[in-house]
Every structure is written in C-alpha cells, then in structure tokens.
Image: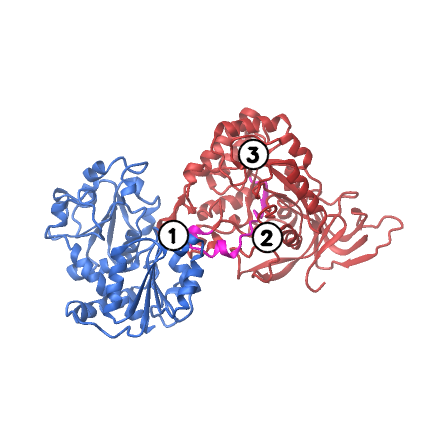
Chain colours: A blue, B red
Amino acid sequence: MKPDLQLTPDGRLRHLLTLDGLPRGVINTILDRAQTLLEESVQADQKLDLLRGKSVFNLFFENSTRTRTTFEIAAKRLSADVVNLNIGVSSQSKGETLLDTVANLAAMQADMFVVRHSAAGAAHLIARHAAPNIHVINAGDGRSAHPTQGLLDMFTIRHFKGAFHNLRIAIVGDVLHSRVARSQIHALTTLGCPEVRVIGPRTLMPRDVSALGVQFYSRMEEGIKDVDVVMMLRLQNERMQGDLLPSAGEYYKHWGLTPAKLKLAKPDAIVLHPGPMNRGVEIDSEVADGHQAVILHQVTFGIAVRMAVMSLLAEA
Amino acid sequence: MRTHICNARVIDPASGLDAVQDVFVAAGCIVGLGCAPEGYVANRTIDATGLVACPGLVDMAVRLREPGLEYVAGLESEMRASAAGGITSLACPPDTDPPLDEPGLIEMLKFRARNMPGPRVYPVGALSWKLEGQRLTEMGELHEAGCIAFSHADAPLIDTRMLFHAMEYAASFGLPLWLRAQDFHLARNGVAHDGIVSARLGFPAIPVPAETIALQTILMLTRQTGCRVHIARISTRAAVEMVREAKADGLPVTCDVGVYHLHLSEMDVADYDANCHIIPPLRSQRDRDALRQGVVDGVIDAICSDHAPVDDDAKERPFQESEPGATGVELLLPLTLKWGAEMGLSLPQTLSRITCIPAGIMGVEGGSLRIDGPADLCLFDPETDWRVTADTLLSLGKNSPWLGREVLGRVRYTVIDGHVDYAGEGF
C-alpha cells in the first residue's frame, strides 16, 4: 500500500481506503473529530454545515442497507446532497466497466464516492483513477478492508476503555473472509494494543494469520481467557454448511459467544459485533442483549465516525 | 542477402564460444564465424562494436492472441514485439479462441506467421478438444501440421485419467506434453499466493499444495507412461525440490519458469497492482529465491516470458477481478540478464537458458551459432538501460509489472533467417 494514495503530500486524509498502513496520528485525528461530532451533532441532534453544497454518491456494487444508510445519515447530518446507487443490478450487469461507471458519475459533479464492491482492490482502483477533487471512501471491498467499521470499533473501545496500550483483545469467528477483522487488526496494532488474539476454526483463518501480528487460538475457552474486549464477527449463511464448517450448530457449540464463555473474559469485558447478528450461531441472545454488549453504541458511534471521515476529506 | 556483422562479442552458449569477432551471413545461414568464406562479398555491414551477438532467443511461451483474440493483440504486433525482444523462435500455447485443436488452425497460423517478418512460430497443440479435458485431440495429425508438443495451457485438466491417457497417447508418437501443475480445486477462484499478503489484503488464495499435488500426479504418471514431460512455469520452492528429485531419478522431465517469477514476489501485489496479477501467482520471497537458484542449478532448464498481452479493460479492474497475465517478450532478455548478473553467472551461462536449452527442449533449430546453421541472431547492447513504459513496448499488451522501472540491456538488431527483422532506434 503506497501511503500517498490515501494521504495528501502534507499528510492529510485524501481517500480512506484501508487502515493498513494508515498512520496512528491520522487515526487519532479521525477518532477525535468523531468525538466532537458525536457531542455537537449526533447526541445534540443538530445538523452541521460542513458538507453543504457537496454531493456524496453511495456506490454500492454489493447490497448493504445498513452500511449505506449510516453513510447516508452521516452525509445528511453534514448537509451534503446524497445520491444512492445500487449498481449491482444496473450498469455492471449490462457490461459497463467499473471505471466507466465511475467516470459517468464523476461527470455528474460528485465530490465524494462511498464505494462497496465484492472485489478486493475496487476502492483503490477508483481512487487511483479519480480526478484530484474527488474523495473515495471504501465501504468494504471483497475480504480486504472495511476501514470505517474498523474505526468505529476503535472509537467504541476507546470510549469504554480509554486507551489501547493495556488491553487484551480477542476477535472471534470467520477472519479469513472478513474485511472487518482485517481492518480491526490493522487499527489495533497501529494503536499499540499489545495483545490481539484471533479465535476460530483453522478453516476460517488465513494461513499466515500470525504475520498480521496476532495470536491464533482454535479453542475459544483458551483464547477468550482474561480479555478486555471481545469482537465477534458475523458468520455468512453460505459458509455454515460445506467444506469450511459442517453445521451452524457445531459452530455455535465451539465458537458461539455464550454467557459461560464470556465469564472466562475479564468481568468488565465489553462485547462488540459489526451486525447484523446471527443469534444462536455466533452469539447467544443473552449476551447480545446483556449489559456487556455495546453493539447498539457501535451503531450510534458509526454515524459520528463516518461524519468525521467525510468532514476531514472535505478539508483535504 | 549477405550480412556481415563486424566486431561483435560473439557468444554461443552451446559451443562455449565467447570472442570478439565477425559473423558472416548468407542465404539465411551463418557461413563464417571469425573469418569470411572465400569470395564472400557483403551487401550489408553492421558495425556491432560494443554489442553482444548471440543466438536469437527461444521463448517457450508466447501468446500471440490469434486466432480469436485480435481485439487484445495480434500476430503482427506480437511478432514485431518478439523480434524487438531479440526472439527468433517461439512456442505459442493453444489457449486461443478457438483453441489450437485441429490441423487447419495450425496450418493457418503457421502460414500467417511465415508471411510476415518476425520469429519462427512453433505451435503447441491442445491436448484435449476445445481444451475441455474430455476428448483427446488428433495428436498425430496435429504434429504433422506443425505442433511440437501438446499442452492444456492454463485450462483446468481435472480428470486424472484423461491426463494419464493423454500421456500414453502422446508417448505412442514420441511426442512431449507441456503441463502446468495446478490442482483445479485447490486453486479455484484464487488470485494470489496463500501467504502474508493475502492474509493482509484478503485475496482469495492459491496454496502451495495446489502446485505440488498436481506436480506429484504428473510425475507419477510420467514414471508410469514414459511420456516426455515439460513442466511449465513452476512457482514454488517445494516444486523445485520435487523436480530435482525426479530428474535425479532419471524421469524424462524438463522444466521452465516465467522470467518475472525470478524477480518478483507476493510483496509486489500488496499495492493492488493488477499488472502483478499473474498465474501461477507471485509467491513468497523464499520461493522466489529457490526459483532463482533452481535455474542456476539446472533443475529449472529454461526461462520463458510467458507472454500474455491483456488489454486495459481487462486489467483496469479491481485486482481480484482483473485478468491474469503479463506482457513479457520485450523483457525476457533484460530480466534474464539481471538474474544472471545477480547470481554471478557468466553471459554465456545466462544466455543458455533462453537460447540453446529451450531450443533443445522444443526440438527445433536455432538457439546456437554454427556454420551452415540458421542465421538467427540477437545483437544487444548490454550496457544500455531503458525505461519500460507503454510507449517503449511494441506489444499491444502494456501490462507489465515492470512498467516505470529501468532495465539494463537493449536489443539493437534481430536477425531471423538471415534478414534483419528488427533494428532498434539510432541504428
């Protein structure tokens, strides 16, 4: 990852494509800005003028109501004009190339593209070919990165735990296919978290996962012991039965977060989940609705974090 | 046409010749090395002072994209690019559209190639009809039409029994199979090496056993059938060791590697550069080092360009969706020279991997300099560096991982069958 694609020559954020290699200072700037926006806008229910006159295009080549909606809300709170495009079902299926689609939309006076695509590298490709005045936010590309999700998770952890340097954190589930897990890992290692664990069956782990600076545990009871934060991952339906896993039931038994397993973590441990949850598959309802879960906070913070990213990009 | 090449450093890896002298060409043949035959009068003289004159390069894998893929590149452009790369003989894989699976297609291709300047073209026939892996092709007929070997290109050959029978059938004619070792199921949907970078960036991965398991199958069947087999484009350290052992056991196998694999690794895909999307994937630095040493040791016999021009529309996509392949004919020489220099080899040793050795595997003329042999020569300036850009490449495929970088060694003249088919700038 060449840092110059994401940053301006003076080190400000130009595109947000990945947290892999994004400097700690930039991440902290985003989190600090999100804190301000949370207080001034989200909690105060106030619209701000920071993006007035700007057009934000939500380009979703892969369906996602939830992420798209939070970006839309964030942009509208900043007074931007928002255009939502579900491209998966229109031009791509007619054979138009990704770059042609983007060039056409850029000609409609877009200022910012929020891109979700099923292929790794899609947001990078668009950023590399975009006009200098256009900013690209990666809202998820293949299994590669989902930086705003990673950032909102960091915001949530910072909110409840204060700092990262004394935390032991476990990420549980399908790391192999998860762009969320990759963004979380990159952010946590950059922010100085001393111990990041990944927990799950070997079939759902990248082969060289330890090269990411994490410790691998196949047994949840060992991996979750004494952690401060448990970050659950969503298990996609299509992976529950096949050559990666035999059944959702066996997965739940070994890697589902139950109250009993959560007891092995520190008593004040918090539980995160990027949503949407599969209750009874990766997480038990009692935990999901329990006092240690901060899942709904994540959603609220997500709006503040996305506002922060958009407002910083608009300044670059 | 009688061409007199003066004062070149003449290197013939096959005979060990390495001396500054003259080369005399007449009627498509070399008629004198060092001294002119009696009564020789040249009608063209090339002052080759400072240049190396070696046998024209022999490239075992050049996709000309004809028939059927002319919107990407065509015979004319890719033959010209090959000549500009110093190549005088090339083998083209059967993955055209339609695939090279019937004699008429081979005859047409050879006819078209013969009637334009550029290298000698040696088609590699499809091993199965339409490359579908279901029905054998008429290897006997195809061989008579001009196929030098049979392969499945990069198309999956899932049915092991089909492979077994193809080997037996090819062995009946004494014909070799050129095979890529890649297990279809393990490699399915993969776009990158199963290593650090795919862990980081989340690329669907191709694990090392995809190569070693398929290679083991090929080697076992080679032992059983006695078919001559050439393993095309190995990419892993483990495969190098397997081929080393197979050769020590006396199996009739040879092996090549793509030239980019001698220099690049998985680290080069970390920037989502679709030009580094190559199959087999660029693997770990440890694998790359084993490949580099494997060529030095002779376990890997030949280096090829694995030339695959891809148009911008197919490359300017998200990495994962981009079409694999790299343009290579114009980089075969400089990147081979770079490898040889870095490994401390002499020029004759280095050049043998892209001249006499592949010519021997292909069973074709060329690849050496001898009196009365074909006048196929490459004259290059080993000291000139040049920048690889879309403009400096003649191939219609601009998809090189080396774009924007400099290389050392530039072809000045390519002589094929006694004709100067390429003369570089300033000459």
Q: Amino acid at mark 3?
A: Trp
**Range of the magenta residues?**
B300-322
Q: Residues within 10 Å of mark 1 (few under 14, many from 20)?
A: many
The lab-note entry on whether marks 1 and 3 share a chain reads: no
Q: CA distance from mark 1 to mark 3?
A: 33 Å
Q: What residue sits right under mark 3 in the picture?
A: B129
> Residue A119 has which mark?
1
The CA span between labels 2 and 3 is 24 Å
Q: Residue at x 17, y 50 (%)?
A: A227
Marks 1 and 2: CB-CB under 8 Å?
A: no
Residue in the foreground of this view, choosing between A63 and B312? A63
Q: Which amino acid, mark 2?
A: Ala
Picture quadrant of residue A124: bottom left
Image position of B167 (left or right of B236): right
Chain ID, mark 3: B
The answer to whether any part of residue A108 appears in the image is yes
Counting from the top left corner in percent of width and height, residue A13 is at: 33, 68
The tag on residue B73 is 2
Judge whether residue A26 is colored magenta. Answer: no
